[in-house]
């Protein structure tokens, strides 16, 4: 079924993978490194009642925000949601379920899921609402809360470069959650900016080995969004003042 990894269209890369009620991991941090083309394809498919595991839910109208607009997400498993007003509205109205995580805990839950670790203990969240209903144990005189590993039906990731065998390279901070999510699902689909032949990527430069990636789609020249652009006034030399 997955012998041919490269697909010419984004919709084809998700063909036969999506179903109502599924769990999807979506890479990215804010709008950096998000698999935007795959997100739009999920929107266009009409699949619904989704549980989405992602650091955040994008912003209004961009990234996972488009799936909130269409009410296709039932539950978010996230660590930061402050950039999305629609998210807040849906959550406060009871329309959207939220499983909130400390960011490091979310990252480790994903990493653990990809490594086949069903649960682990961490100090983060002990004595707070994060620990409510969870197993808390003492190790060496300190309390730790148990967190479950996360594993999804589908992971969608964005890579700077990929080869036809699915080996992936991420660029700078766009690496973020993508590598660990690529390991933590039954099927991982990657959109790549630059697609090259097998053997063209130095093995020492590979961030995600192709064994984890089932399907690839080439998405050249994606739009690189910025949540909040912050600038400062230019310092004008006295000689430039007229």
Image: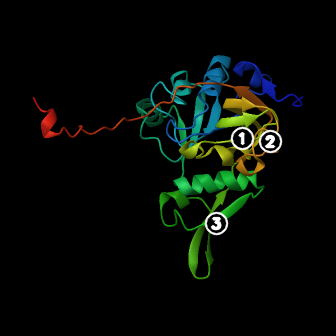
Q: Residue 88 carries which label?
A: none
> Eyeballing the image, is 15 above or below 238?
above
Judged left or right of residue 90, residue 210 is right
> Eyeballing the image, is 27 above or below 112?
above
> Eyeballing the image, is 197 above or below 171?
above
SS state under label 2: helix
SS state under label 1: strand
Point out the frontmost of discs 2 and 3: 2
Task: Choose top left, top right, bottom left or bottom right for residue 236.
Answer: top left
Point out the frontmost of discs 1 and 3: 1
N-terminal label among 1 and 2: 1
**Residues at marks 2 and 3, CA–CA distance in whole angstroms:** 30 Å
Residue at the (80%, 41%) spot, across then down = 210
Q: Nearer the viewer, residue 189 or 236?
A: 236
Q: Residue 168 carries which label?
A: 1
Asked if labels 2 and 1 touch by Cβ distance under 8 angstroms, the answer is: yes
Q: Mark 2 points at which residue?
A: 210
SS state under label 3: strand
Report x, y in % for residue 32: 52, 38
Q: Which of 190 and 84 is in front in this view?
A: 190
Residue at the (27%, 39%) spot, across then down = 232
- Classed neighbour count for the residue bearing mark 3: other residues with Cα under 10 Å, few (<14), some (14–19), many (≥20): some
**Residues at marks 1 and 2, CA–CA distance in whole angstroms:** 7 Å
Q: Mark 3 points at which residue?
A: 121
Q: Nearer the viewer, residue 118 or 94?
A: 118
Report x, y in % for residue 237: 17, 39
Q: Nearer the viewer, residue 236 or 36?
A: 236
N-terminal label among 1 and 3: 3
**Residues at marks 1 and 3, CA–CA distance in whole angstroms:** 31 Å
Quadrant in which the N terminus appears: top right
Residue 188 in view here: yes
């Amino acid at each position: 079924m997955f012998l041919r990894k490269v697909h010419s269209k984004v919709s084809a890369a998700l063909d036969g993978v999506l179903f109502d009620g599924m769990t999807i991991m979506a890479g990215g941090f804010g709008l950096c490194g998000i698999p935007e083309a795959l997100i739009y394809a999920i929107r266009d498919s009409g699949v619904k009642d989704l549980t989405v595991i992602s650091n955040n839910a994008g912003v209004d109208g961009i990234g996972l925000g488009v799936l909130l607009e269409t009410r296709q997400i039932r539950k978010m498993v996230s660590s930061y949601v402050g950039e999305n007003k629609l998210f807040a509205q849906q959550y406060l109205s009871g329309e959207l379920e939220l499983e909130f995580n400390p960011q490091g805990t979310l990252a480790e839950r994903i990493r653990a899921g990809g490594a086949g670790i069903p649960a682990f203990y961490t100090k983060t969240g002990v004595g707070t609402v994060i620990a409510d209903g969870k197993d808390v144990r003492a190790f060496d005189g300190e309390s730790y809360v148990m967190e479950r590993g996360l594993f999804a039906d589908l992971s969608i990731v964005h890579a700077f470069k990929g080869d036809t065998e699915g080996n992936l390279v991420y660029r700078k901070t766009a690496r973020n959650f993508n590598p660990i999510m690529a390991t933590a699902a039954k099927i991982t689909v990657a959109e790549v900016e630059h697609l090259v032949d097998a053997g063209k990527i130095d093995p020492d430069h590979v961030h995600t080995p192709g064994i984890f990636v089932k399907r690839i789609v080439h998405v050249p020249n994606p739009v690189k969004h910025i949540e909040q652009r912050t600038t400062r006034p230019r310092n004008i030399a006295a000689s430039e003042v007229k």
